[in-house]
Image (cartoon, grey):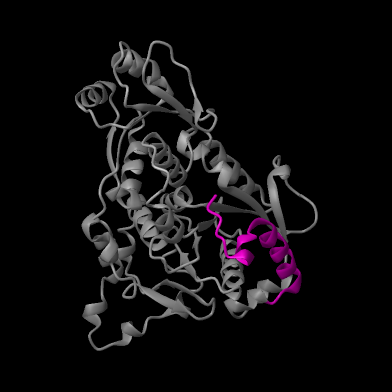
Amino acid sequence: MHQVQQCWVIGLPDKALLERIRDYWKHSLYADRVHLRVFSQMDTLRHYVGLQTDVQLLIVDPEWKEEVHADLFEGGDGTSITVVEMDEAGSFWHEACVKESTASYRVTPYQPLSKLFEQLWGLGLSIAKISEDPMKDKQDAARTPIWTISSGGGGAGKTTIAAHLVQYASERGLRTFYWNMDWIHEWGHEAQSPRAHQADSQAYEGSFSKLIYWLSRKETLEAIPPDPYILPMEELRADTFDSNIRRSEWNELDHEAVTSILNWLSGLERYDLIVLDTSSNHLLAEAAVLVSDQVIWVLTDDCSQIRKSERCWKKWGNHTEGRSIAGRMQIVVNRYMGAWMNNFTRESSVQAYLPYIPQWKQRQRMDQGGSSEVFQAAFQAWIQSTAQWMHTGTPSRG
């Protein structure tokens, strides 16, 4: 157990966001380093901070800034506290001047939780005048980048692109994990577990639900062995979860479970890349997107796909957590035939166009999807421009 070095208090009116922040902290490397309290009501926040002497960072919503200043810091109090304002339009650690206050003020934008925690931790170290970060090596080594392949609906080609990404990474020596988040999916029969045929089948039953159970127990998080739950996937030269998952186990998956699984996977120090192939279950897809470092949004020249995608992006723009996705998202147009047939107003945001391959309509096996030199050339041109770290060995997490 590491010694707690920092004490943070977060006050935001968004209870759902606070819960996700608390859950991320609970399953992250910061759990043993940071004492964290969260509040959604100003009066309880005021009472708690007023009684504490060891709070270093007070992170608040912009709407609470004036009240925090008036109630807690006027008159010379709060000399040891730095107030961090969560402003979506704020510049990076821009210091604000607040008259008649001895508290220090900073501004930071809403952003992915991994980046937010990293920046808050760094700020806490600078306040304490600690030049050497005791977590830096663990953060760099333990955090595996997560790429999520998503779309506005089924049939866009997410699995084809995910498979190409996994194969491309594996061919370059990267240790890759692939998770198809459909209960029944195209590659399922290719990753059968030898344990399923053992005589003691009862010992195997319920393995995925057991993983979810153990991940819900924070005190055992670091001790969970991966081998009972992870299998090699020879066709893609990657690892995956066993596809023999009972429907009752799959139904246990929710936002919190997916987040816990991904935090556990990325902290195993076993993989260089985690690829998530999302399903039509919007709850699971949203959980994957929110925790990911890169979101590859697959779009086709189809009226329904375009409309669903634009509605989804609009909904994301209506809440602070969703707005953070835009900076991590790349739009890839799949099955492109050289010109748009439908109205799409965000052509300037497209990072890649992948061609339509007519012969794939007659595939007999999933692995035949890697047989098109035209598609391979377009895919490799895109991935080489967007993921140079796959060639240098230095992962990018933003």
Decide if residue 393 is on the left or right side of residue 69. Answer: right
State which region is magenta.
371-398
Residue 387 covered by magenta stretch? yes
Query: Please, which residue is most extreme toward the left here?
Result: 51
Residue 28 can be seen, yes or no = no
Decide if residue 89 is on the left or right side of residue 132. Answer: right
Q: Tell me where residue 14 appears, x and y as whole percent.
A: 36, 31
Residue 385 covered by magenta stretch? yes
> Against 115, is 90 above or below?
above
Q: Quadrant of the N terminus?
A: bottom left
Residue 372 sits in which quadrant?
Answer: bottom right
> Against 105, is 67 above or below?
above
Q: Tell me where residue 353 appears, x and y as whole percent.
A: 72, 56
Residue 248 sits in which quadrant?
Answer: bottom left
Query: Which is nearer the eye, 150 or 306?
Result: 150
Q: Residue at x 74, y 68 (%)?
A: 377
Q: Residue at x 56, y 55 (%)?
A: 396
* Main secondary structure of the magenta stretch: helix
Q: Residue at x 34, y 63 (%)?
A: 250
Residue 61 can be seen, yes or no = yes
